């Protein structure tokens, strides 16, 4: 379809990816209809602070919003909140929403995100057992995060560990149960995982590693988590932090190609040329990683999808993709990640972990593929730049702390 | 509350009433000032909220932390008065602040 024929864009999912798409379409000069449909009551908001400043009570909902609610009307974006899209009719290019109304589109953008996995255990529905994805989830948790309360986090991923850090800062008693033998097993190296394990332990978090939760105990309210080896961990609150599954129900219903996420090409186009898919629900070839198809769960990926799609719909200059990036805040540690570490064969450390400021660089052969930088922003940005431009540096250069990162990056090829 | 003037690279001005406690970045993004991307939402992780603080105001906006300074080292067209706007907190003392935006954040 030539871009001039696109008069009506519907975006399903008013999260970060959907919200950014609407905004960037307008910024790129698109003057047709934009309808943004979201199941949650709030206009698009940022999720990262939910497990950080918002959980601590330092942020309110207004501050989470990507844009004030009034902006959508001002920019002539039809924002339909608390409304679920239930059916896609590709042949007639229509979306049906709850209640039966049908809305026509020329281009459809699926930005349906992901939903948190429920604990597959008896007792998972007890009062006091929380999922952690939405502002409503955080709001339910917040009043219970009081000093002295016993929190059990099941799953030691970034969100679980961030919640654990906030809980310790608020004076809760915190236990993290993880089925793997180390925390962050899916997302970082044993070395960096070990650093975070030590840090949390020092801050008073107890870990049950290699632990198999068998049952959530309690009558009306949760009272604890029973492990398969017979041990019991008492709990007033349980947070399930065992990851998410991409929200692909609509894509499957209308017959789009779906694997681990809705499959798209580099332009975020699905197997239907009138339908794009972006953000946590979609998997696309990552240009800096030999076009390996990956479903990334990050703000970077949500924003990137929005930029790619806005450029494609308006026929503008294609967006130049950035190397993937991510961050996590725990206590006073800022972890900044660039690239994708999967498949690395060696790791190079710059700085020492005991200083609580170091960077772990991941190599595949001679190629630098990722960095985990703790309180080391120069190493993070420098490595991001190298990965983005396909350059690399010898490990010995990075190990030499006497040379500033900027200089190393400038000399790299 | 502080009145803040954002001047785009093209010279276009945006005058915004920014509430105390927000950051200079947030006030701009909430009012859709073009030229501040702020992809990370203020987490000091993206360096796409770069501004030039009008020299008269440098004393009042304070100094960049070492974290911010290291991020700025890698931004484009950095000057002595460069700051990451997500790291400047709005207060009454900044009433009248003028910041200029770079040509590009990437
Ligand atoms: C607690 C937490 C902390 C995080 N911290 C970080 C971090 O520090 N750094 C980072 O980079 N990333 C972080 N992330 C990840 C990041 O927030 C996500 O990758 C990002 O929000 C994905 O955006 P999205 O728009 O694809 O999905 P979502 O934000 O999940 O939005 C999808 C929206 O679509 C709606 N929807 C789904 N189906 C339908 C339907 N049929 N009809 C209508 N609406 C529908 C959903 O209700 C939802 O509101 C964090 C995530 C969480 C939950
Ligand atoms: S908004 Fe990302 S660094 Fe300022």
Image (cartoon, coloured by chain):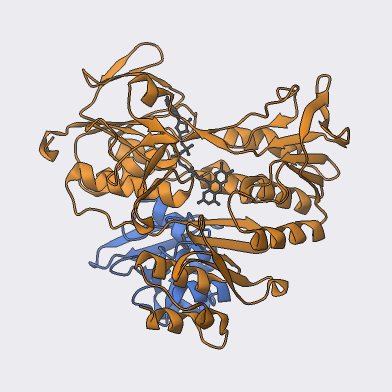
Chain colours: A orange, B blue
Q: Position of residue B64 (x, y in %)?
A: 53, 75
Quarter occupied by the C terminus of chain B: bottom left
- The answer, for residue A195, to whether it is visible in the render is yes
Q: Position of residue A25 (x, y in %)?
A: 26, 43
Of residues A228 and A374, the one nearer the viewer is A228
Q: Position of residue A333 (x, y in %)?
A: 65, 63
Q: In the image, is residue A14 above or below residue A121?
A: below
Of residues B41 and A226, the one nearer the viewer is A226
- The answer, for residue B65, to whether it is visible in the render is no
Q: Residue at x 83, y 55 (%)?
A: A204
Q: Position of residue A82 (x, y in %)?
A: 46, 24
Q: In the image, is residue A356 above or below residue A46?
A: below
Q: Residue at x 47, y 78 (%)?
A: A394
Q: Residue furthest top?
A: A100
Report whether A211 appears left or right of B69.
right
Report whether A117 appears left or right of A216.
left
Asked where in the image residue A241 lies, by quadrant, the reply is top right
Asked where in the image residue A223 lies, by quadrant, the reply is top right
Report whether A89 appears left or right of B23.
left
């Amino acid at each position: 379809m030539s871009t001039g024929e696109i008069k009506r864009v519907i975006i399903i999912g008013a999260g970060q990816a959907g919200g950014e798409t609407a905004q960037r379409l307008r910024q790129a000069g698109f003057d047709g209809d934009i309808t943004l449909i979201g199941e949650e009551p709030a206009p698009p908001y940022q999720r990262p602070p939910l497990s950080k400043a918002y959980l601590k009570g330092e942020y309110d909902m207004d501050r989470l919003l990507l844009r004030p609610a009034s902006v959508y009307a001002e920019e002539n974006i039809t924002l339909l909140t608390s409304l679920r899209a239930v059916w896609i009719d590709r042949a007639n290019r229509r979306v049906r929403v709850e209640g039966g109304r049908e809305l026509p589109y020329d281009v459809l953008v699926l930005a349906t995100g992901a939903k948190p996995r429920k604990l597959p255990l008896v007792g998972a529905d007890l009062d006091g057992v929380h999922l952690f994805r939405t502002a409503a989830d955080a709001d339910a948790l917040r009043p219970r995060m009081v000093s002295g309360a016993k929190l059990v986090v099941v799953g030691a991923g970034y969100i679980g560990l961030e919640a654990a850090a906030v809980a310790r800062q608020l004076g809760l008693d915190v236990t993290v149960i993880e089925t793997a033998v180390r925390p962050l097993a899916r997302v970082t190296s044993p070395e960096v995982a070990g650093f975070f394990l030590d840090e949390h332990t020092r801050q008073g978090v107890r870990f049950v590693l290699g632990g198999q939760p068998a049952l959530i105990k309690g009558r009306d309210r949760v009272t604890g988590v029973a492990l398969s080896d017979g041990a019991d961990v008492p709990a007033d609150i349980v947070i399930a932090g065992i990851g998410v599954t991409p929200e692909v129900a609509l894509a499957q219903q209308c017959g789009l190609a779906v694997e681990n996420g809705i499959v798209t090409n580099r332009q975020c186009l699905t197997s239907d040329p009138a339908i794009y898919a972006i953000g946590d629900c979609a998997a696309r070839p990552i240009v800096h990683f030999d076009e390996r198809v990956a479903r990334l769960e990050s703000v970077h990926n949500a924003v990137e999808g929005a930029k790619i799609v806005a450029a494609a719909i308006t026929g503008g200059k294609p967006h130049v993709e950035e190397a993937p990036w991510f961050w996590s805040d725990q206590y006073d540690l800022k972890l900044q990640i660039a690239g994708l570490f999967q498949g690395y064969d060696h790791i190079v450390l710059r700085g020492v972990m005991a200083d609580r400021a170091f960077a772990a660089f991941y190599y595949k052969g001679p190629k630098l593929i990722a960095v985990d930088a703790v309180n080391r922003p120069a190493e993070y940005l420098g490595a991001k730049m190298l990965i983005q431009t396909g350059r690399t540096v010898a490990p010995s250069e990075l190990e030499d702390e006497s040379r500033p990162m900027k200089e190393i990056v400038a000399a790299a090829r | 509350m502080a009145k803040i003037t954002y001047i785009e690279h093209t010279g276009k001005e945006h005058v915004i009433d920014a509430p105390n406690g927000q950051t200079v970045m947030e006030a701009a993004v909430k009012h859709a000032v073009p030229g501040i991307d702020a992809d990370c939402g203020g987490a000091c992780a993206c360096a796409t909220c770069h501004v030039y603080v009008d020299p008269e105001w440098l004393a009042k906006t304070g100094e960049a932390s070492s974290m911010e300074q290291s991020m700025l080292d890698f931004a484009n067209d950095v000057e002595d008065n460069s700051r990451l706007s997500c790291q400047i907190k709005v207060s009454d003392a900044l009433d009248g602040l003028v910041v200029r935006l770079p040509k590009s954040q990437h």
